[in-house]
Image: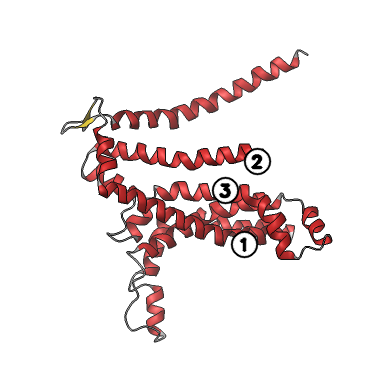
Amino acid sequence: MSEAPWHSRARRIFVVPAFAWLAATVALPLALVAAISLGEATQGAPPFDWSFTFSNYAIVLGDALYVEAFAASVRIAGTSTAICLLIGYPMALAIARARPERRLWLLFLVVLPCWTSFLIRVYAWMGILRPTGYINSALQALGLVEEPLGLIANAFAVHLGIVYAYLPFMVLPLYATIERIDAALVEAAHDLGAPPARAFWRVTFPLSLPGAVAGSLLVFIPASGEFVIPDLLGGPDTQMIGRILWLEFFQNRDWPVACAIATALAALLAGPILLFDRYRARGT
């Protein structure tokens, strides 16, 4: 009887450092950003004063530039997430259905690109997609095109870069979920006369939805605030909120407006997280 309180106290001791770390690295910076967003821009150092005004949020929500940037970020991130799901689900299913001795190697191939610097991988796509890059050079050498194709500095290149960069974050949660599905359930569906396609849609797919939702969040949330890929692969018309945020901080030096954008983005991305938490609670 005396062990339960001891275990409870030990559990709290181990939990406290984790919460302290989250408070120092997540809660405190977010609180600082939210506080600066209520200030006013100045020409001094730091370039803001500690006041209390919601005018920066009025600017962010009332200016068409920021609204369109938010909409473009959500649209591009949502489309890229859907493409990652369409590509990643068959990959995860194939890995989960592969022989046990092959799964480790297939997972290794999925995460292998992550061993290289993210920035270097994006620069590599610039070399592949540019007018004098490998794709256009090969097409022109084969006589398939006369002029280089416009593969870079557009929304297509941004989608391609995001899908390439974040595809592993879709595959891994899907694989972890599908691999845990009891094979006896699928066999039972086959024994009851269900063809493979019907067994998949009625058994495998519903049970894999938690992994699909988790993978979609892991792709959608960072893709919404992406800066490097739109800046290097996108053109001037690809104004995602990450680029606007960088311009406000480092070019316009309007920290309060930039922090208001960052706070609004955090609030926008909190919605999918809350929906996922509610979905998981209902599933439990």
Q: How many marks?
A: 3
Q: Which kind of residue does numbered mark 3 sit on?
A: Val
Q: Which kind of residue does numbered mark 2 sit on?
A: Gly
Where is residue 29? Give x, y as percent. 38, 31
Residue at the spot of label 3:
213
Specify the farthest residue to the left. Answer: 43
Residue 117 appears in the picture as rendered: no
- Among numbered discs 2 and 3, the one appearing first in the sequence: 3
Residue at the spot of label 2:
283
**Residue at position x 63%, y 38% in the image:** 282
- Among numbered discs 3 and 1, the one appearing first in the sequence: 1
- In the picture, which quadrant includes the C terminus? top right
- Among numbered discs 1 and 2, the one appearing first in the sequence: 1
**Residue at position x 20%, y 43% in the image:** 252
**Residue at position x 79%, y 58% in the image:** 189
Local packing at callout 1 (Cα closer than 10 Å; few below 14, some 14-19, many 20+) is some
Residue at the spot of label 1:
90
Specify the farthest residue to the bottom. Answer: 143
Tags 2 and 3 in contact by the CB under 8 Å rule?
no
- In the picture, which quadrant includes the N terminus? top right
